[in-house]
Image (cartoon, coloured by chain):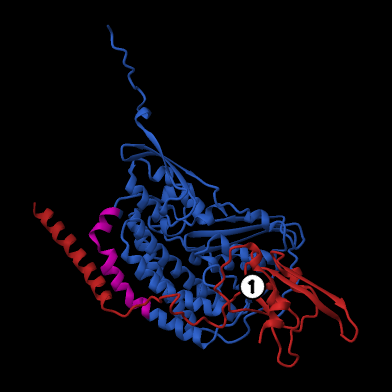
Chain colours: A blue, B red
């Protein structure tokens, strides 16, 4: 009697598919990743998007350009002011509205505070993904100070709608300046503490070093920008590469690392906080007097027919707005290029053959904000 | 073998350094607020839902039913209506409602108001079991206010 055993030529038979998300804590939102596992190794990954899609781009086609400002904050709730900035800049470019200098200074100060806030949240949440619970408490302690400062001037804590076409909607006062200065010295004094608590930790070193390798070539293929790209040694930052607003006036460095792994982008983000503090300090020193809104901003903002583009450096990379206008006050089409979407697309290549626990640390290093991906 | 012990030592030391930080935090003042029992003072610039301002000189709001806020609202959450009345210059406001479920607190209505009769309230403790609880009748609210 012969034994009838089917030989498995295809090793896919040993694999099984695991759904990571859409409710997984380390995806920070509703992102689903299909993992094809072989033992504990992820052999194939497939991100599934669309759970948080709210048709923001389509909404923009149905209402006056000015009315889209609150929507920009809902795309990336961690970099709301920077998204405001990009959109306000786009409309100013299109209509030729001049922004007063004081307003530009306020924009830069609040945007950089927003960037630090975003990095602090990422810092806490990323380490939480990796299993360290304590750092998020320290990071949130600092972050609360920024939220209080920004709440006092913008009126909101997270989804700000503070910038307007032609300036900002409310002037800052002495209280803002003193509390911001106090915060700068506070955060500076906290950096060595973070260094001791987290960055030097042997467990973190072992979990991040040589995990999720990227190189400039891969980054160029996928359109990866932001700290991930700077982690591979390319010092590409829009605040320097295509200077906008009043960034050319400030002296700051673009932190880079060369290795391209998770540790590299981790350190780049950490150093960026210090650079943002430097920018804020210089901006506070040079803050001019004057109005914060342009004198003449038409009530009905008609965009001359044509194509317009505006790019800013968001906490996660390059953010672009592309507007096509047919001459009316409602855009014909508004395309938003969000950094997380491009950064996410590298996952299948970056994480192939990784241990499952390393996938979590590689995905955390991308600093994904899901509403920005789906928008 | 030597590198094994040096890794063990530097690794162990990094953990001790980290524990020192947490130990220090144990004896530092508490930074959290025990929310329902104690409350932080909220900034006057906080943006709650919009409310009609009660002016001291007239004892009521100054809405002239121009409808600018209604037109400028990105989410169409404001309804204003008025009628012509004897002895009142312009229109008399009879309806002013806000659907706060749709409001995104952008502030377009407050900025466009020609008589500055719209302002943000300072209410942040909003919770309800039905949608209807967030449909505010602002005229009624301004009358009830001291």
Front-most of residues A327 and B31: B31
Q: Residue A67 occupies which quadrant of the picture?
A: bottom right
Residue A305, percent from left and from top? 75, 59
> What residue lies at 37% left-to-right and 76% top-to-bottom?
A187
Residue A190 position within the rendered picture, expressed as x and y whole percent measured from the top left = 33, 75
Could you tell me which residue is drawn at 27 percent across and 67 percent down? A197
Compared to residue A35, the image places residue A125 above or below, namely below
Q: Which residues are magenta?
A: A186-207
The image shows residue A20 at horizontal and vertical percentages of 42, 45
Residue placed furthest toward the top:
A1
Tell me: B78 left or right of B44. Answer: right
Q: Which residue is mark 1?
A: A164
Q: Determine if the magenta segment contains residue A206.
A: yes
Task: Kindly report the secondary structure that dominates the magenta region of the rendered protein.
Answer: helix
Query: Among all residues in the image, which is located at the extreme bottom?
Result: B57
Residue in front for this viewpoint, A276 or A171: A171
Residue at coordinates 77% horizontally, 80% vertically from top-left?
A: B63
Q: Is residue B38 above or below residue B3?
A: below
Q: How many marks?
A: 1
Q: Is residue A142 magenta?
A: no
Q: Is the residue marked by circle 1 packed among few (<14), some (14-19), or many (20+) residues within 10 Å?
A: many
Residue A5 in sight here: yes
């Amino acid at each position: 009697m012969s034994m009838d055993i089917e030989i498995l030529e295809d090793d896919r038979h040993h694999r099984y598919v695991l759904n990571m998300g859409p409710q997984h804590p380390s995806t920070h939102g509703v992102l689903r990743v299909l993992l094809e596992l072989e033992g504990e190794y992820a052999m194939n990954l497939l991100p599934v998007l669309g759970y948080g899609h709210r048709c923001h781009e389509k909404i923009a086609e149905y209402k006056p350009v000015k009315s889209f400002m609150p929507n920009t904050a809902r795309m990336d709730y961690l970099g709301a002011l920077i998204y405001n900035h990009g959109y306000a800049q786009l409309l100013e470019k299109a209509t030729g509205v001049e922004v007063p200098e004081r307003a530009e200074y306020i924009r830069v100060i609040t945007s950089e505070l927003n960037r630090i806030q975003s990095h602090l949240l990422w810092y806490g949440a990323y380490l939480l993904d990796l299993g360290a619970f304590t750092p998020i408490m320290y990071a949130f302690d600092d972050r609360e100070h920024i939220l209080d400062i920004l709440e006092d001037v913008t009126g909101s804590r997270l989804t700000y709608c503070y910038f307007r076409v032609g300036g900002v909607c409310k002037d800052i006062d002495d209280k803002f300046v003193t509390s911001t200065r106090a915060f700068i010295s506070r955060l500076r004094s906290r950096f060595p503490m973070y260094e001791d608590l987290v960055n030097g930790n042997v467990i973190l070193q072992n979990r991040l070093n040589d995990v999720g390798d990227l190189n400039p070539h891969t980054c160029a293929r996928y359109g990866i920008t932001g700290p991930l790209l700077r982690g591979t040694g390319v010092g590409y930052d829009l605040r320097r590469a295509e200077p906008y607003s009043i960034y050319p006036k400030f002296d700051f460095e673009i932190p880079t690392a060369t290795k391209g792994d998770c540790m590299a982008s981790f350190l780049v983000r950490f150093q960026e906080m210090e650079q943002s503090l430097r920018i804020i300090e210089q901006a506070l020193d040079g803050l001019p007097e004057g109005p914060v809104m342009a004198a003449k901003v038409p009530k009905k903002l008609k965009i001359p027919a044509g194509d317009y583009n505006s790019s800013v450096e968001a906490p996660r990379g390059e953010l672009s707005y592309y507007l096509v206008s047919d001459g009316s006050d409602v855009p014909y089409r508004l395309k938003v290029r969000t950094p997380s979407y491009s950064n996410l697309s590298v996952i299948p290549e970056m994480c192939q053959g990784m241990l499952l626990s390393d996938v979590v640390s590689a995905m955390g290093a991308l600093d994904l904000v899901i509403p920005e991906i789906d928008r | 073998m030597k590198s094994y012990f040096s890794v063990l030592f530097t690794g162990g030391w990094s953990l001790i350094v980290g524990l020192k930080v947490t130990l220090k935090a144990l004896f530092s003042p508490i930074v959290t607020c025990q929310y329902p029992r104690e409350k932080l003072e909220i900034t006057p610039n906080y943006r709650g839902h919009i409310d009609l301002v009660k002016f001291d000189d007239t004892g009521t709001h100054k809405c002239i039913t121009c409808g600018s806020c209604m037109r400028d609202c990105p989410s169409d959450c404001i309804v204003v209506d008025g009628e012509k009345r004897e002895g009142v210059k312009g229109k008399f406001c009879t309806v002013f409602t806000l659907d706060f479920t749709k409001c995104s607190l952008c502030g377009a209505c407050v900025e466009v108001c020609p008589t500055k009769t719209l302002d943000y309230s300072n209410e942040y403790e909003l919770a309800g079991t039905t949608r209807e609880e967030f449909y505010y009748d602002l005229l009624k609210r301004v009358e009830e206010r001291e």
